[in-house]
Image (cartoon, rainbow, N blue to C red):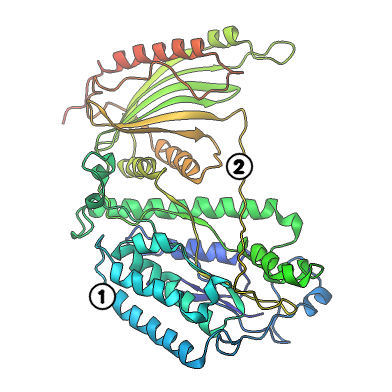
Amino acid sequence: MTPISTMLPIWSTWRVQAWLPAALAPILGLLAACSGAPPAPARCPTVVSVPSAPTSDAPSASPAPSADDDADVQMQAPKDAASLGWCTKDEQQAALDETKEIAKLVSKLPKDASAADAVTGRIAGLFNSPCYMDGTLARSPDMAELEAARAWAVAKWWDSGGQDFFKDALQHANAVHFAPSIPRMIAPELLPTSDPMRAILCPSFSAVCDPVAEGTALDVGRELVRVGLLQERAHREDSADDGLGSPEACARSIRKEPPAERLARYTACVDKLVSQLPALPEARYRSPQGWLVLRGRRGHYSFCDEARAYDLETGTAYIASRCGGLVLDAGGAVNQGATRGTGAMKTQVGTLSVDALRRLALALWLKDKLDKDARPYAAFPLPAGVPMPDPDRSFGFGFGSGWGHSGQTSIQFEINDGKSTVVSGTFVWPDAFSVGDQLADDLVVSAETTFREGCPRVALPAGLSPARTLGGVSGIDASPDTLRKNADDLSAAFAELRKTKVCKK
């Protein structure tokens, strides 16, 4: 078995003796790597180097096949682009030399949102040179995205696998190479002056303006990787029955296909072995300010319609909850009138961890801005019996899925400066399919676990009120009229909470 090189941009390099993703080693390695990363909201991709041809004493990490199955899986010995006749030796050397020159240019790029047209133009020109076979095996990055990328993002991309993609595709040309994703970057100087995102961003060209926010972003990035890895593992477990969890299994699956179709089917199969993990946008972040307000129903058979207001500076918390339980008729249908009658109002005042609230607020700000399927550089050798590609042929692949259940509700959130709403949205509660929603769920639980009752440090602003209705609840469980009445009850409770005396400083 040939080892995988797992490399994180700038931070560290180590080796895992397993094929991605045949075992959990890559998942555990990523978690360990991200937990030790320096303070920057960077992605933590796995870069899979192209393995050499297997040797007789190299053990297989594929879980499903027998020893006999493994023995008859043969990969093609590595060949460079010139050996395959795709370009001349001089053209291959020119491409390698150009890779080195581009690396020098990338090293001089500023770590900000400056344009990088000169560099990205050279990269596009390199990929269009003869040795890359028009991207048939070297699955190219999105060139439109790359040419639009700014200096900081281009440097991150090149250092985290872009350079390896270009070099390896020349030296092991009879392998399928997947370029890494181009990092998403946001900076206030690139946004309209009216964009609310500017409230949590420092200029990309400035020194760190908010060290606390930098640490918060790092924490949220780690949580995001954790959620993404857990969801990816669940997906792989759900799809394990197809037995296609390794490149060897993909090689076996195409044996009965016509020779002309094997390359496309193998490429589509190994494409599904490349991790797609969520990542925060590259940015210099500023700590969210104001009040975070959460409204909605939590629970199903036993539930609470709630309005919660949290001050992001002091951690002060005001909570109003109307809790009850579903009343079912003999046939199993929900008796909405009787259910409404079970409700009882409760209010609480106290404090939460400010750090936990800041993580939650930043995650809510960014949940619709995430790079949801960031891919590392990865490469897979071609099996024996797969003909070399036709340069005029292209492939398409990919899949999608989703899930949900009737016990889920939608929680409304807003960040308010005390007078007006700065940003608002919703997230599914609990156990969401969307990685951004699941991250929000987990951070809500993490923050609210720190709640301690006591006198508030600041008063509840008059501009914060529960919504006039509480949507996001299954129509089976509650009618719009019932939800409006519950919202009115919460509004009355908030009015009483505004009378609470604050702690003496």
Q: Secondary structure at mark 1?
A: loop
- Disc 2 marks a residue whose amino acid type is Gly
Say left or right for 211 vs 50.
left
Q: Secondary structure at mark 2?
A: loop
Name which residue type carries label 1.
Answer: Lys
Residue 139: image location, x then y, percent: 54, 68
Q: Residue at 62% across / 60% down in the picture?
A: 272
189 or 456: nearer the viewer: 189
**Residue 108 marker:** 1
Label disc, if present, on residue 181 of the rendered structure: none
> Is 122 drawn above or below residue 224 in the view shown?
below
Residue 459, quarter of the rendered image: top left
Horizontal side of residue 320 vs 81, given as left or right? left
Mark 2 is surrounded, within 10 Å at the Cα level, by few (under 14), some (14 to 19) or many (20 or more) other residues, namely few
Query: Which quarter of the figure has residue 365?
Result: top left
Position above or below: 290 against 36: above
Q: Position of residue 340 (x, y in %)?
A: 54, 10
Separation of disc 1 and disc 2 at Cα?
A: 43 Å
Residue drawn at point x = 34 percent, y = 36 percent: 352
Q: Is residue 359 visible?
A: yes
**Where on the picture, by quarter, is residue 38?**
bottom left
Q: Which residue is mark 2?
A: 402
Q: Is residue 9 visible?
A: no
Residue visible at 39% across and 53% down in the picture:
280
Q: Quadrant of the N terminus?
A: bottom right
> Residue 8 at what x, y percent from top left?
44, 70
Quick one: label 1 or label 2, which is nearer the N terminus?
1
Quarter of the image with the C terminus in it? top left
Q: Is residue 354 above or below residue 341?
A: below
Whether 501 is drawn above or below 240: the answer is above
Q: Residues within 10 Å of mark 1 (few under 14, many from 20)?
A: few
Q: Position of residue 166 (x, y in %)?
A: 47, 77
